[in-house]
Every structure is written in structure tokens, then in C-alpha cells.
């Protein structure tokens, strides 16, 4: 397995390229003492300098000594809601203004 490390400015550049191509980006944020996912809006960045400690039924955040953006294992939230949205159109109808 290869590991890639790049500067923060390169990450920002990658996010801008993906946005211009119509992709929706997601970032990590700290909310209610947990690392969770949120939609990436313009000029926002992922949370950094956080890591998580997980042991037998516990989850807590801890500050990192570096500026790592993805320096945590897994939060309490799943990617499923982003990859498989819970909304699906199953029927559509249109009202016609013409009368027979």
C-alpha cells in the first residue's frame, strides 16, 4: 500500500478542482465532542489537529501535535447517508392545463 502526503495548499487546490467539476465535497467537523461529516461549503476546510481515542465503549477527542487533516480513525457517523441518500423519487406526475 502506498502512502501519499501532500501540502495543505495542494488539498485546497484538489477540492476546488472537484467542486468546479460538479462534485459535492464533505468535510469533517467537531460537533458534540465527536468528529462528524458535513457538506463542504465554499472556503471551508476540514477540521485539523484532532484525533480520536477509542477503547472498550469510549470515544474521546484529543488534540494532535501536527496539522494532520485526516488524523483520526473513524467517528460515530457512517458514510452511508452520503453514498446512499435515503430519498428516492418513486413517482412523478404533472398537471396539464389543457381541457379535453
Image: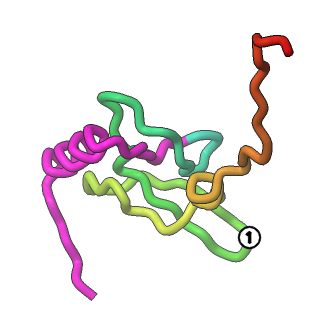
Which image quarter is the N terminus in? bottom left
Residue that extends furthest to the front in the rendered view of this protein? 100
Question: Is residue 21 one of those drawn in magenta?
Answer: yes
Q: Nearer the viewer, residue 28 or 86?
A: 86
- Asked if residue 54 lies left or right of residue 68, the reply is right
Q: Nearer the viewer, residue 10 or 95?
A: 95
- Expressed as whole percent of the image width and height from the top left, the position of residue 77 reads 64, 56
Q: Residue at x 53, y 54 (%)?
A: 61
Q: Nearer the viewer, residue 25 or 55?
A: 25
Q: Residue at x 49, y 68 (%)?
A: 73
- Asked if residue 24 lies left or right of residue 9, the reply is right
Colour scheme: rainbow
- Expressed as whole percent of the image width and height from the top left, the position of residue 33 reads 61, 45
Stretch in magenta: 1-30
- Asked if residue 26 lies left or right of residue 74, the reply is left
- Asked if residue 69 lies left or right of residue 50, the reply is left
Q: Residue at x 65, y 51 (%)?
A: 85
Q: Nearer the viewer, residue 31 or 65?
A: 31
Please tell me whether residue 5 is drawn above or below residue 50 in the rendered image. Answer: below
Say which element carries label 1: loop
How many marks on residues? 1
| Residue designated by label 1 | 57
Which image quarter is the C terminus in? top right
User: 10 Å neighbourhood of mark 1: few (<14), some, or many (≥20)?
Assistant: few
- Expressed as whole percent of the image width and height from the top left, the position of residue 35 reads 54, 51
Amino acid at each position: 500500500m502506498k502512502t501519499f502526503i501532500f501540502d495543505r495548499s495542494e488539498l485546497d487546490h484538489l477540492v476546488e478542482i472537484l467542486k468546479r467539476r460538479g462534485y459535492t465535497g464533505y468535510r469533517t467537523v467537531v460537533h458534540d465532542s465527536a468528529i462528524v461529516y458535513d457538506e463542504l461549503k465554499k472556503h471551508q476546510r476540514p477540521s485539523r489537529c484532532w484525533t480520536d481515542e477509542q477503547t472498550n465503549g469510549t470515544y474521546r477527542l484529543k488534540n494532535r501535535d501536527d496539522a494532520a487533516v485526516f488524523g483520526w480513525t473513524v467517528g460515530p457517523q457512517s458514510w452511508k447517508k452520503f453514498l446512499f441518500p435515503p430519498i428516492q423519487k418513486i413517482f412523478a406526475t404533472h398537471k396539464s392545463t389543457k381541457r379535453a
